[in-house]
Image (cartoon, grey):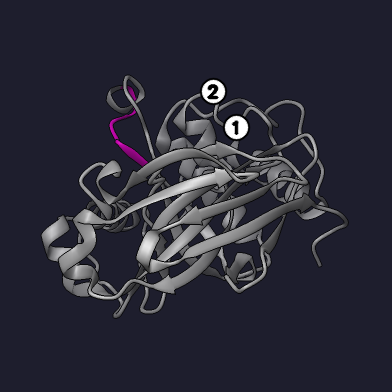
Amino acid sequence: MSHAHDNSAASPIAHAFVAARRNSHALDVYPGVQPDSLAAAYAIQDEAIAAWPDRIAGWKLGRINAPHDGRFGAGRLAGPIFSRNVWIAGHTPTRFGVIEGGFAAVEAEYVLELGETAPDRGDWTADTVAPLVSRVFIGVEIAGSPFAEINSHGPAVTASDFGNNAGLILGGEIAGWRERLSGLTCTMAINDIVIGRGGATAIPGGPLDSLAFLLNLLHQRGRRLEAGQLVSTGAATGVHDIFAGQSASADFGPDGRIDCLAIPATGALA
């Protein structure tokens, strides 16, 4: 299955990001000519996925705000979540590494688990994807990049480096989600100060619309979403910058909370 566009500029950029992530070192500038379209961005992302020494456990979705959504022809962007960067939340704060001089943020998210491998088609809607979902969890996406300005140059730059993803903390299962999804709310605190409030309705079209968007995008990219994979559907309270030494808590009310702690990323990934 081919995932690459014909883009000779993609490979050096992809390998620069992969090397920087694997060695936990920051990039002061974008490592090449910045992509000017999402197609070019996903070509870079596909090259980096091929070079990354891990399997895809799921995908994250991020919002593309106006006026970028009109210019780039999409309201969301996607990036891979790798299996070694999925952590199960416990009673003690989950520790995650941030690259000094890079970018890091925490996002409260609703995470969908696929119960079956999705049929390969490009006309999914929020209604038609619902039967594919087996469970929904609370979660915290760890956004992160070696490039500190990852979000400052438009959505194509953000998408090109794994969609600015550095991991996913998976919390507890949400009981009765099919009936409750639109009413779910949550808050995010950093160092015990609440800095964001929101919920499922803060995600444009809701979490199931995020899944439909992803499936249609993966169809265009020659990829598929497989049974058991996770989909982090978008920031429910916003994107909150975090630095090493800071703690964060995502509180989902009756569905639980996730505590985490940012620590310096050190050493090289094996």
Indicate whether residue 74 is drawn in magenta.
Answer: yes
- For the residue pair 16 and 204, the one nearer the viewer reads as 204
Residue 121 in the magenta stretch? The answer is no
Measured Cα–Cα span from mark 2 to mark 1? 7 Å
Percent coordinates x, y for residue 241 in the rendering: 60, 36
Helix, strand or loop for disc 2:
loop
What kind of residue is marked 2? His
Relative horizontal placement of residue 151, taking residue 18 as reference (left or right): left
Numbered circle sitting on residue 132: none
* Residue placed most toward the observer, 63 or 176: 176
Q: Which SS class for mark 1?
A: loop
Q: Nearer the viewer, residue 165 or 255?
A: 255
Closest to the observer, 53 or 132: 132
Residue 19 in the figure: left or right of residue 125: right
Say whether marks 2 and 1 touch (CB < 8 Å). Answer: yes
Q: Quadrant of residue 96?
A: bottom right
Residue at 25 percent of width and 41 percent of height: 204
Residue 162 position in % (x across, y down): 55, 48
Asked if residue 111 can be seen in this view, the reply is: no
The N terminus: image quadrant: bottom left
Q: Which amino acid does label 1 sit on?
A: Ile
Q: Which residue is drawn at 66% across and 61% down?
A: 52
Residue hosting label 2: 153
Q: Residues within 10 Å of mark 2 (few under 14, many from 20)?
A: few
Where does label 1 land, which residue?
150
Residues rendered magenta in the picture? 71-76
> Relative to residue 84, is residue 76 drawn left or right?
left
Percent coordinates x, y for residue 229 in the rendering: 42, 72
